[in-house]
Amino acid sequence: MLAAPLSARAEDANGTDTQTATSESQSSTQAATLTITQTTPVVTSTSGFHIKVSITNNSNETTPAGTLKVSTNTLFTFVSRSDIQNWAEGNAPIPTPDELGSASVPAMPAGDSVTVSVDVDSNQHTLASIPSWGPKPLLVSYSTTNEPQGEQQAETQAETHSFLTRSGDGLTTAKTPDMNLTVALPLTADSWQVDGTVINELVADTDEGTTSALVADAGDHSRTQTLSKHQQLQVVADPSYLEAIQTSQTQATQTTNAHNAKESVNFAGYAGIMQPSDFDITTYGSLNDAEAYESAGIYTDQWSAKQALSSYRSAIGDNQASTDTYAWQGDSGWSMEALTAAREQGYSTVIADSSFDEERTATVHTGTYVVNTEAGDVTVLKEQHELSTLTHGQATSDDATAETSDAGRLARLLAQSAFYQMEQPYTERYLLTTFDRNASAEWIEQVMSALEQADWLNLTDLHTMAQADPYSVSDSVNLAQDDQDAQSESSEDTENARSDVGDTRSALKQLTASRHDIMRMATSVLKNGVDVDALSDPQALARQDASSTAQHDTDPTAWIGSLLAAHDAMALCAMDGDSDTGNRQQMVTGARTLADTLLSGVVITPSESVSVFSESAQMPVTVSNELPYAVGVQVNSITDSMQIVTSSTNELDIPARSDAQVAFTIRVSTSGSTVAHVSLADRQGQPFGATQDTPITSVLRISDMSGFIIIGFAVLLGIVGLWRQFNRTKDPDE
C-alpha cells in the first residue's frame, strides 16, 4: 500500500523529477566513481548506520570541494524481485527524500581519490523513524558546487544505489517465522604443489619415509581460525586436503619444537566431506568416457564415498569415525550421467549451483530436489542464484555499481535475503548459498557475522535441508528455460562446459602419456619386468611393505606401485572442480616430471670423439643406471654417412645403480668425418631418453693387404706407361 503511491511519485523532496535526475546523472557518471568500502549490513535499534565511501576523480581536471549525501526512503517497501534489481542497477524511479547524513569532500586533483565517512547515530531522526523491518533503498550521491555567473549551483558528479536493511529489533511490528538458510563452504586446497625432492626420492627408492609428492597449499591459515568461530557455517571438507594438512603438521612437529610447530587444525565440527581431491564428477559425466580417465590413472575407487571416508579417518586418526558425504559440483552442470556416476560411487546427496534448475518461479522456493537415477535416488541441494552470486564475490549485474565492492555486495546480500523472507513469510522454505572455493577469511567473517545478526533468518545445516520436503521429485534433470535471459545464460554456460570438456580431454591425453612411460619402465625396461596384473591397484602396492630386504632388492613391484600411486594422485588432483586456478596444468606438468625423471635414470654417458685409422674400429658406449633395480635395454647407433657406418643395435643389461659398457663396430670405406647418434630403446624397440652424439673422424692409412695391392697396381701402370713412351713410333714432325 505504501509502495504504490511512493513509486508513482517521481519527485524528490526538492520537487526534482527523479527520472530526469537519473538520466542526467548517468550522463555524467564518468566524472567520478563511488565505491562503498564499509557499511552497516544489518541496522538494529542500537547499531546506528555507518558507511564509508571512496570517491575517485575520473576527469582530467581538479574537481572543487563537494558533498557526499546518503539518503533513503523510510516508508518504501520493495514488492518484487524486479524492483529490487532495478534499484540496484539505478533504473527504478524510487525517491529517497529522507536524508541520513552527509560529509564534506575536499577538492580532488585529476585521478585522485579520497575516502569519506558518514556516521549516523541510532537516535538520528530518519533512522529512528523507520517503521518496519526489511530492505530500504539507499542512495549515495556526490555533488560539487560551481558558480555560474555568480550563482552557486550543485552539480551531481556520481551516485550509486545500495540498500539499508533494518532488523526487527526494537520495532513493534509482528514477528513472522524465520526463513531457513544454509550457508556452505567447500574446504579444499587453494592449490596443489609437486615436491621435486620427493619425486627424486621416490624414483631413487630411498628410505626417507615419504609417501606422496603432493603438498597442499592451505592458503591463509586465518581462514581455518575463522571457520571455527562460526558453528552454523557448513564446512564440507576435501578429505585429501585434510590428510595432506595432517601429514604436513606431523612432519612440522617432528622437525621443530612444540613452540615453533604449526598450529593444529581442528577437524571436528565440519558438516561433512566431499569427494577426494575435489574431483570434478560433473565433467566426468559430461565427458562420459571412463576409459579415458582410467588410461590416465584415475579410477572410480579413488574418488568414491568409501575412499573419502577412509581418507577422513586417516586424517583425524579415528578408524571408526563417521560423517556425511556430499558430491560438490565441478565446472560442468549436473547431468543425469553425472548424478548416476555419483550415486554409483556412494554419494546420495550432491551440491548444485543455480543452473541445475533454471525454471523461473514467482517466488523463491526450497532448493531440495530428488532425482531418480538408475543407481538410486539422489538428493540435490541447489543454491539460490542471487544469494550465491553475492557470496561468491560477484555482482548480480554489471550495472549494479554498488556491488563492485565487498561492502556493497554484503549490503545487497542482506537486503535480498530479507526480501525473500517477506515474499512468503509463513511458507516454510530452505534456501542454500555457498562460498567460493577460494573465499578469503575476511570475506567469510563479514558474511557470517552479518547473517548471524539477521533475525529473519534461521541458519540451518545441510543435513536438515537434505531431509526437507523436496521441491521436486523427478526422473530427469530440469533444464527448463522461461525467458530470454535464462537462455542467454545457459548458452554461455554451455560454451564454458564445452571448453572445460576440451581442456579435460587434453589433460587426460597428457596424463595417459606420462603413465604409459611409467608402465613401459615396469614392463619393458626393468630386467625383472613387473606383471601388469600386479599393478592393478597402485595405491595398495604403495602401502605394502616388502616381505624381506632380499625380495625388495630383486622385485620392483612395490616400487613401481609407489610411482604409479604418486602419478595417479597428481592425475586426480588435475581433475578438480575449479579449472580456473591453474592447478590442472601444474599437476599435468608434475606427472610428466615424474615420468621423465624415471626414464632419465638410465642414460648414455657422454663420450669423446672417435678417430679411425683403418677399415674398422670399436666405439665403446657406457650406459649408466641410477635406478634401484637392474634394467635391460637396447642401445642403438646410426651415422649420417654411407661411407662411415656403425653396427646398429646391441642389447645390454645394467645392474642397479651401476654402469655397463657395450662396443659398436665402425666400418670405414674412405677418409672423412661423421656423427654417430647413439640412443636407448626398451626391449620392444621403443626409444626413450636423450640421444648422445659422438663425432667420428676417419684417416685411412695404407696398413693392410688392400693398400699394398693398390700400390702394386699403380707401379705396374707406371712401368707400362714408360715402356709405351719409349717404344711407340714417333710422327715425322715430332
Image (tube, grey):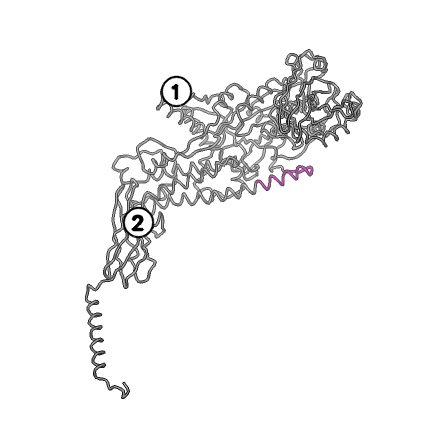
Q: Which mark is residue 633?
A: 2
432 relative to 702 in the view: left or right: right
- Image quadrant containing the N terminus: top right
Earlier sequence position, callout 2 versus callout 1: 1
Q: Which mark is residue 317?
A: none
Which residue is under mark 1? 260
**Magenta span contains residue 259:** no
Nearest the viewer among 703 and 57 is 57
**What is the x, y in percent for residue 147?**
75, 24
Q: Residue at x 30, y 32 (%)?
A: 207
**What is the x, y in percent for residue 152?**
76, 22
**Magenta span contains residue 492:** yes
What whole-number distance in Å separates the C-alpha atoms at marks 2 and 1? 50 Å
Most distant residue in the bottom direction? 732
Secondary structure mainly formed by the magenta segment? helix
Category of crowding for the residue at label 1, using alpha-carbon neighbours closer than 10 angstroms: few (below 14), some (14–19), many (at least 20): few
Q: Residue at x 34, y 34 (%)?
A: 544
Q: Which residues are magenta?
A: 479-496
Category of crowding for the residue at label 2, using alpha-carbon neighbours closer than 10 angstroms: few (below 14), some (14–19), many (at least 20): many
